[in-house]
Amino acid sequence: MQIAIDGPASAGKSTVAKLVAKRLNYIYCDTGAMYRAVTYAALKQGIALDNDKVLAEMLNSFELKFVPADPEQLVIVNGEDVTKKIRLPEVTNQVSLVSAQPSVRKEMTHRQQDIAAAGAIVMDGRDIGTTVLPQAEVKIFLVASVHERAVRRYKENVSKGIETSMATLEDEIKTRDYKDSHREISPLTQASDAILLDTTSLNITEVVEKILEFIEEYEKN
Ligand code: CDP
Ligand code: CDP
């Protein structure tokens, strides 16, 4: 069984996808981390982030591994632990440019489909239900208001000792959503057979329980 969870920035996708995977004992794949890892590597190598040809060359020797660990799985790129680095603002604010490049999308889509071929999976991202796993049995499109998503990011930043104003966070979220929804290849969009779940007033547990209910309903029918 494949569960696809898509939606805009900071809707809670990775948090709930991870918990759903744990409850079901499924593999979890964070595809956003993959685009972030490519962006990090390109920045490190000084590659222009919109240079599709050079990015394609870089991807020829781009080794990306998810290593199980507690409390979160590690993201390893060419032997380097980039788990924390790929969440830095420098990456977050430029990832949409890299993820819009054709060769990057093609390569990441292949790798994600290979990961999914290994067994039952929960995968989250922007184009999982539409492009990566169009045959997924259960597709969820998670949304929440921009304000609520900025509040969630704000609290997360505070817990990490990062100071960012609410206005900046709202602007960043809106800008990234716009770029991700308006790119040419596999833009962020709700699959026609996805269930829309508005989480603005739901906590993490409530969202997880709702998704598990949708899965149970699918299994009954
Ligand atoms: O967690 P957050 O919402 O900040 O984003 P993410 O899921 O880590 O994704 C980071 C970026 O990767 C997104 O803004 C997209 O540009 C890109 N992405 C994508 O294009 N396709 C996916 N399936 C997943 C992420
Ligand atoms: O993966 P995505 O960018 O969609 O979101 P995330 O990184 O999973 O969640 C962003 C933040 O919202 C995290 O700090 C979560 O703990 C929090 N969250 C929440 O407060 N309520 C929810 N219903 C879902 C997530």
Image (cartoon, helix red, strand yellow):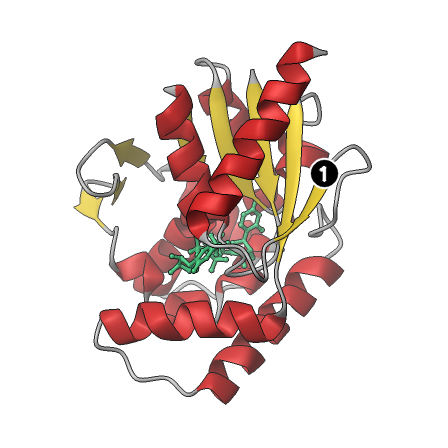
Determine the image quadrant of residue 159: bottom left
Q: Position of residue 180 (x, y in %)?
A: 65, 59
Q: Position of residue 51 (x, y in %)?
A: 55, 60
Please, what secondary structure does the residue beneath circle 1 have? strand
Q: Is residue 151 above or below residue 144?
A: below
Picture residue at 35% right of the left edge, 28% below the top: 22
Q: From the image, tell me which residue sits under label 1.
A: 195
Q: Is residue 13 above or below residue 168?
A: above
Q: Is residue 111 above or below residue 56?
A: above
Q: Nearer the viewer, residue 44 or 132?
A: 132
Q: Nearer the viewer, residue 48 or 197?
A: 197
Q: Nearer the viewer, residue 181 or 146?
A: 146
Q: Nearer the viewer, residue 156 or 131?
A: 156
Query: How many numbered discs sit on the rendered protein?
Result: 1
Determine the image quadrant of residue 158: bottom left
**Residue 26 visible in the shown view:** no
Q: Amino acid at mark 1?
A: Ile
How many other residues sit within 10 Å of disc 1, few (<14), some (14-19) or many (≥20)? some
The quadrant the N terminus occupies is: top right
Q: Position of residue 217 (x, y in %)?
A: 66, 21
Picture residue at 19% right of the left edge, 40% below the top: 79
Determine the image quadrant of residue 77: top left
Q: Position of residue 60 (x, y in %)?
A: 42, 37
